[in-house]
Amino acid sequence: MQKVLLLSFFIFQITGLFAQKFTWEDKELEAVNTKVEIVNMDGVQVLKVERDLIASPFDEKNIEASVDGATYVKLTNTTIENGTIEVKVLSRIMENSPFPAARGFIGLAYRVDQENKNFQAIYLRPSNGRAEDQLRRNHTVQYFSYPGNTFSRLRREANGLYETYADIGLNEWITMRIEFEDEKATLYINNQKAPSFLVQKMLGNSKKGSIALWVEIGTIGYFKDFKVLKKQ
C-alpha cells in the first residue's frame, strides 16, 4: 500500500456554483462538483479528487441521470479545439461507497465549455480490466459526451462501439494520452505504440473548450504529470 500523507493546508472544495481556483503543477485549475486535495504520495505532490455528493447528488434509483456529468477539476483560461492531453491516473474505490458497483471511474474530459454544459470524455473502469467475467472486461474503457450521451445510452444504442477492454487495475498508475482532432479521438494507455481505443466520430455539441481531470461516484482518484499540447 502506498503511503499517502495529507497536506491539510491544500484543501479545496466546491459547493453550489462557486468554483474554488488553485494552482497545481504550475497550472491554474478550478474544482467543479468535486472535493480536491493536494497530497504527498511517495514524495510527489499529486491531486486527489472525489465527487462532491452535496454539490452533485447521486441517486442510485436513477443512475443514468446521476452519472457521466460535470464532476471534474478543470483548467482555467484554456480553450482547445484539437490537441493532445496526457496524465497519470490512479484510482481506488472508497470505503462505504455510495454506489456498490463502483469500478474506480477516472479519466479525462476535453472540449469543456465555460459553463460546464458540454464536453467530451474518455474514462477508465480499472476494476473491470482483470475481472473474471469477459463481458465486464469489455467495459473497461468508456467514451461519452455530456449532456445526453451517457454510458448506458451508448451501450444500448451503439452496441459496444464506444467502449473496450484494457489490461489495467485499481491502485496502480496508468498513463492516459488522448489525441483528439475534428471528430476523432484516440486513446493510448501506458505509452503503448498502438492505440488502445478509437472513437471515429465523437458525439454532442462540444467542438472546443478546456481540459479537465474527471472522476465519478465511489472513486478516490489521483492525478499527476498533467500535460496539454494544443495543436497549431
Image (tube, rainbow, N blue to C red):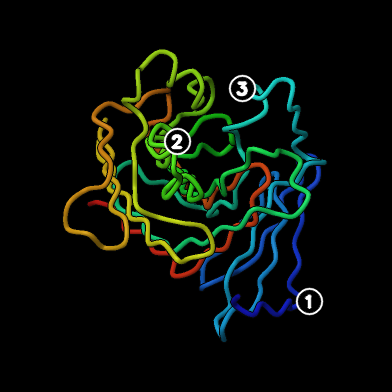
Query: What's the distance in space between the residues labelled 2 and 1, CA to CA?
Result: 40 Å
| Secondary-structure class at tag 2 | helix
The answer to whether residue 93 is left or right of residue 113 is: right
Quadrant in which residue 3 is drawn: bottom right
Q: Amino acid at mark 2?
A: Arg
Residue depicted at 28% across the width and 41% down the height = 197
Q: Which numbered tag is attached to residue 231?
A: none
Q: Amino acid at mark 3?
A: Glu
Q: Position of residue 218 (x, y in %)?
A: 68, 46
Quarter of the figure with residue 12: bottom right
Pointer 2: what residue?
A: 136
Report the residue marked by disc 3: 64
Q: Mark 3 to mark 2: distance in Å?
A: 18 Å
Reply above or below: 130 against 22.
above
First in sequence: mark 1 vs mark 3: 1
| Local secondary structure at mark 1 | strand
From the image, state whether disc 1 or disc 3 is nearer to you: 3
